[in-house]
Amino acid sequence: MELYINRNWTERHANAYIAEAIAWSEEGNHATIFAQGITAEEADAKLEGALRELNLIPEAPIKDGGGSKEGRSG
């Protein structure tokens, strides 16, 4: 399966913004997933959250405020 997400696809419709992602399978099937928000950033964030819930994109990295702690001891 291939997943296409493009922030340029976020468009204003009436009083809301719509973010879109398209998934294609090897068998030729496809699905379009939309999310709506008051701003383009909100629509994009909702779409990314939905795609994470569906396990179509990896979880967002956890920010610890001080950089990565990998490889550190103590």
Image: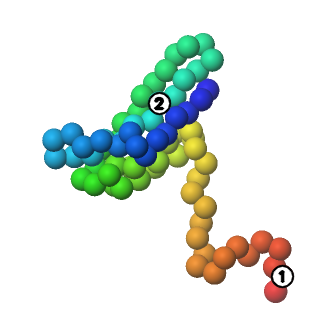
The residue labelled by disc 2 is 22
Alpha carbon of mark 2 to alpha carbon of mark 1: how far? Answer: 43 Å
Judge whether 70 appears above or below 59 on screen.
Answer: below
**Which residue: 16% across, 46% down?**
15
Q: Residues within 10 Å of mark 2 (few under 14, many from 20)?
A: some
Secondary structure found at label 2: strand
Q: Is residue 65 left or right of residue 69?
A: left
Residue type at mark 2: give it. Answer: Ile
Question: Where, quadrant-wise, is the C terminus in this rendering?
Answer: bottom right
Q: Is residue 58 left or right of residue 29?
A: right
Foreground pick, 16 / 51 = 16
Question: Where, quadrant-wise, is the N terminus in this rendering?
Answer: top right
Could you say where residue 60 lies in the image, as x and y percent from the top left? 57, 57
**Which residue: 40% across, 43% down?**
8
Q: Is residue 2 left or right of residue 45?
A: right
Q: Quadrant of residue 13?
A: top left
Residue type at mark 1: give it. Answer: Ser
Could you say where residue 22 lies in the image, as x and y percent from the top left? 47, 30
The residue labelled by disc 1 is 73
**Which residue: 52% across, 28% down?**
23
- Residue 71 shows in this picture: yes
Look at discs 2 and 1 and give the one toward the viewer: 2
